[in-house]
Image (cartoon, helix red, strand yellow):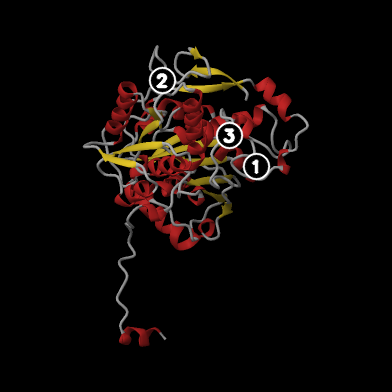
Amino acid sequence: MFEKNLLCYECGKTYPVRTIRFRCDGCNGSLEVAFDYAKLKARYRGINTAKRPFGHMRYSELFPVKAPIQAGEGGTPMMRSHNLESLLNLDFQLWFKLEYQNPTGSFKDRGSSVEVAKALEFIRSGAQKKPAAVCASTGNMGASVAAYSGIANLDCSIFTPSDAAPIKLEQILAHGAKVYRTRGDYTKAAKLVESAHERHGLYLLGDYLYRREGTKSVGFELAEQLPGADYVFSPVGNGTLVSAVWKALKEFRLLGLGSKKKQKTPKLAGIQSSGCNPVTKAFRKGGEIRPVCGSTLAVAIECGNPLDGQRALDSVNESGGFADDVTDRQILKARELLAEHEGIFPEPAGAVSLAGLIKAGSQGRIKKGSKVICLITGHGLKVPYTGVRGKAKQLKPAVLKSLF
């Protein structure tokens, strides 16, 4: 493998790669895996990666684990808008990256593939004493972690906020994990699992360093599927997805992967709900992330104190992009548009990217002729339907006759 060390994003302190650590013990900052890119360049020299199957494992050398757990994750399609470009009178191309087609219905499976495999490595080496893990989740990550932990025969407990969707809890339970609902929001659940890790030695799963490394494969794929993209719109909750995409795009460029002629690095747009928008507030004020108390119908991104918030903010800034927020009403409208006109049925959080794109387009922030990708992150069947289409009607004989 090609890791050099673990690096604190905040203060720069380094740790050995075989160390089990999730936060910097100096400043409590977010950690990341630092790679030896010189060795990686040598590794990829002369290799035609296009001959490898398209998907999560194509650039597996950039994962800090020997054997990721595979369940069919990655390789999700990129689809150009059939109708919304015309309906919304857009003067740029609109593309959708369908991340809800991953095995458990969200992009979280990419991170779980690497993160759960890393937990197994530590257990088998004896570095992790207890073969049990704990994770805080609003639902999607919990379902993914539970599924991949089931494959790994790893005992797993999931702590969720009080407003987690019941159907997501059912999915977690179906995969064999224990579920504990907290009396509070995601931030409260995250504090509880970090306490369980520190006090009881349970392995900590969630939006930490190894999940980010697995999530990078989203960025590798979109760089290959649409190498001339100008913008990537992404929902922002904890900030792990948008920061993982940015790290992937930088690695792609640094290592000279993909098409040399068409390749360029797109700008990132991180979109939040106005009901819970710490990253957007920091972007507007030009300052640091400040925790907020708030709520949104897009519960999957309801993170008032995002673990990777500063990293997400830095990612959109470094890319030349921006952070913005949209109302719950705008999110639900975007969801309706996707379902009715594109055949795409996302959960509210999965429609946040399109809602942000519509807002940005109306403000003239997208240049004419651009190519724009919206990440559709979670499936609509993960939450109860909230929309304007009403309820299904009981079909009576008299109604049936009037239909024909």
Q: Is residue 352 above or below residue 84?
A: above
Tell me which numbered mark, 3 or 1, is placed earlier along the sequence. Answer: 3
* Residue marked by disc 2: 23
x and y, in percent, of residue 238 in the image: 39, 33
Q: Quick one: SS at disc 1?
A: helix
User: Which residue type carries mark 1?
Assistant: Glu
For label 3, count other residues whose C-alpha is less than 10 Å away and answer few (under 14), some (14-19) or many (20+): some
x and y, in percent, of residue 23 in the image: 41, 20
In this rendered view, identify the residue nearer to me: 293 or 166: 166
Q: Residue at x 62, y 25 (%)?
A: 1
For label 2, count other residues whose C-alpha is less than 10 Å away and answer few (under 14), some (14-19) or many (20+): some
Which disc number belongs to residue 224? 1
In this rendered view, identify the residue nearer to me: 211 or 360: 211
User: Which residue type carries mark 3?
Assistant: Ala
Q: Residue at x 39, y 56 (%)?
A: 381
* Residue marked by disc 3: 67
Q: Nearer the viewer, mark 3 or mark 2?
A: 3
